[in-house]
Image (cartoon, rainbow, N blue to C red):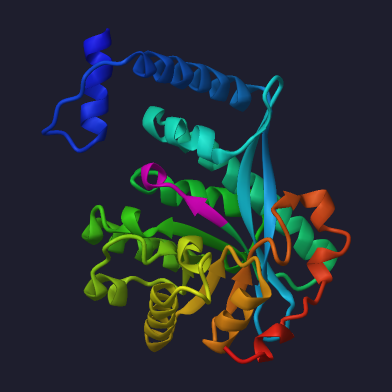
Amino acid sequence: MNADSAMYLAKERGKNNYQFYTLAMTERSLERMTIERGLRHALAHDELRLHYQPQIDSGSGRVVGVEALVRWQHPEWGLVYPDRFISVAEETGLIVPIGAWVLRTACQQAKAWLETHGPFNCVAVNVSPRQFMETNLLQTINQTLAETGLPPGALELEITESAVMQDPENTLQVLHQLQQLGVRLSIDDFGTGYSSLTYLRRFPVQSVKIDRSFVIDLPDDEGSKTLVRAIIALAHELKLFVVAEGVETAAQLSFLKSQQCDSLQGYMFSKPVDAELLKPGLMSAEFDTSASNQPI
């Protein structure tokens, strides 16, 4: 059993290497088994929750959409964030039923907002690499839209850069099928992988999201400034919409708006919150983005 633990760690670290067993590996295996059992229980007993973080138009300050983010309301641990359980869900395949639940719940909520709050651009839902490779992904999305009544254009699927590049030709085919459904497509965490610009040009996506790791050091870090400028310029040349996540300060806001970043998301505007908290004021709020008039 101990040798197996070391072997699995060696595989996780790229294969073609060796790892010595340590007690921490057993503790990690026990944690993984506990989380896996807990997730199965969570799916069966309605312990998953969705929080929503607004996306703000950098020009008008209006809420133009939200990103749906999954949480786990554990009976003993309290509210558990995805960084603790998503990797286990990916490894075990539980990400597929979890992803289907997230998709359905987000579409139901977006439909309710459309009916009660008038114009609503879209709800963004993350699609994991494991989900993206599922052969019935298209059927699941099509069926969910039909059952919830959400217009396809009000759903945006966020796919990570690393996921789309695992099998670019297959990815291209799936993206075109999703495009034909009428849903919006976005590349999440853009710039953190090693995308081929040839494929990026061919992918039928409407937007890219700048990862918060590039935003966090703006505008003090020259390297971050250069990368963000380049990403926004490249995306706009390709006629893509640009969203920056992790915006927390007026200085970050000022820089991003000076570079014509289209939409902003982060704690400066709102943390991810329950739909009931989002509904009363945030959906119709207009945020002050005038800080961008300051010199950079």
Q: How many marks?
A: 0
Q: Nearer the viewer, residue 78 or 253?
A: 253
Residue sticking out furthest to the front: 220
> Residue 65's x, y, as percent?
66, 67
Is residue 224 depicted above or below 129 in this figure?
A: below
Side (left or right) of 257 relative to 79: left
Q: Is residue 129 magenta?
A: yes
Q: Is residue 169 magenta?
A: no
Residue positioned most to the right:
280
Q: Is residue 66 above or below residue 221?
A: above
For the residue pair 212 and 172, the one nearer the viewer reads as 212
Identify the residue at image location x=37%, y=72%. 204
Q: Give me the residue at 40% from left, 31% from top.
A: 93
Horizontal side, residue 259 vs residue 64: left or right: left
Q: Quadrant of residue 61?
A: bottom right
Locate residue 74, reporting x and y percent.
67, 25
Position of residue 242 in the picture relative to residue 22 (left or right): right
Quadrant in the picture for the N terminus: top left
Q: Residue at x 41, y 44 (%)?
A: 131
Q: Can residue 146 be seen by looking at this rendering? A: no
Q: Which residues are magenta?
A: 125-131
Q: Residue at x 29, y 74 (%)?
A: 202
Instruction: Give how far across and how far down residue 187 sits, in percent.
Output: 42, 64
Image quarter hosting the C terminus = bottom right
Point out the residue furthest to the left here: 16
Any part of residue 27 in sight: yes
Q: Position of residue 96 (x, y in %)?
A: 46, 37
In this rendering, is residue 238 above or below 137? below
Q: Is residue 139 left or right of residue 265?
A: left
